[in-house]
Image (cartoon, rainbow, N blue to C red):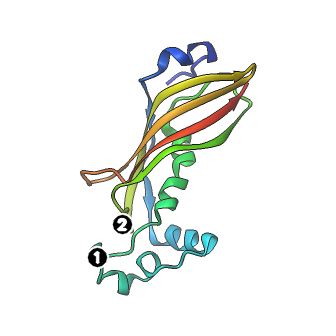
Amino acid sequence: MPAIKVSEIAGKIGESMGTSDWIEVGQERINQFAECTGDHQFIHINPEMAKMTPFGTTIAHGFLTLSLIPLMSETAGASVEGVRMGVNYGLNKLRFITPVKNGKKVRGHFKLTGYDEKSPGQHLLTQEITVEIEGEDKPALVAETLTLLFT
């Protein structure tokens, strides 16, 4: 997908901005996230105990799945021409719908839902991002994200 010009962004509202490549969420990644955040709940890091839960295995932290969105964005295909820098501006909405089980793959579907020129050279994009789990009917999460682009 070719880069979008800033002047064209407003006309893209409601359109898909691309779909990322699949990313495997394995136990090593889950353990690393637990170490970084201090969240060592057994459902994430203890495969033996997690077998006894309704999930049957360890699951990724919801915030781990959310934190993969920048990586997903790298391969989703859409970019804005002339951007010097983009920063995470926050979330309007976030719902964790289905846990991501150890070893599953996820990918993000990006849809532009809003645009606002905050000031010259600063552009606020609102996107709906749905993180799909390979082989599952329901997504892992749906988020409305805000990204501030500097041109």
Residue 43: mark in rendering:
none
Q: Nearer the viewer, residue 76 or 96?
A: 96
Assign the C terminus to one quadrant of the image. top right
Type of the residue with mark 1 = Gly
Residue at point 55%, 55% (across, down): 67
Residues under labels 1 and 2: Cα distance?
9 Å
- Whether 146 is drawn above or below 62: the answer is above
Q: Quadrant of residue 122?
A: top right
Give the percent coordinates (x, y) of residue 64.
51, 61
Q: Nearer the viewer, residue 68 or 123?
A: 123
Mark 1 neighbour density, 10 Å: few (under 14) some (14–19) many (20 or more): some
Type of the residue with mark 2 = Lys
Q: Is residue 102 left or right of residue 138?
A: right
Task: Kindly identify which residue carries mark 1.
Answer: 56
Mark 2 neighbour density, 10 Å: few (under 14) some (14–19) many (20 or more): many
Task: Kindly identify which residue carries mark 2.
Answer: 101
Residue at point 57%, 71% (across, down): 32
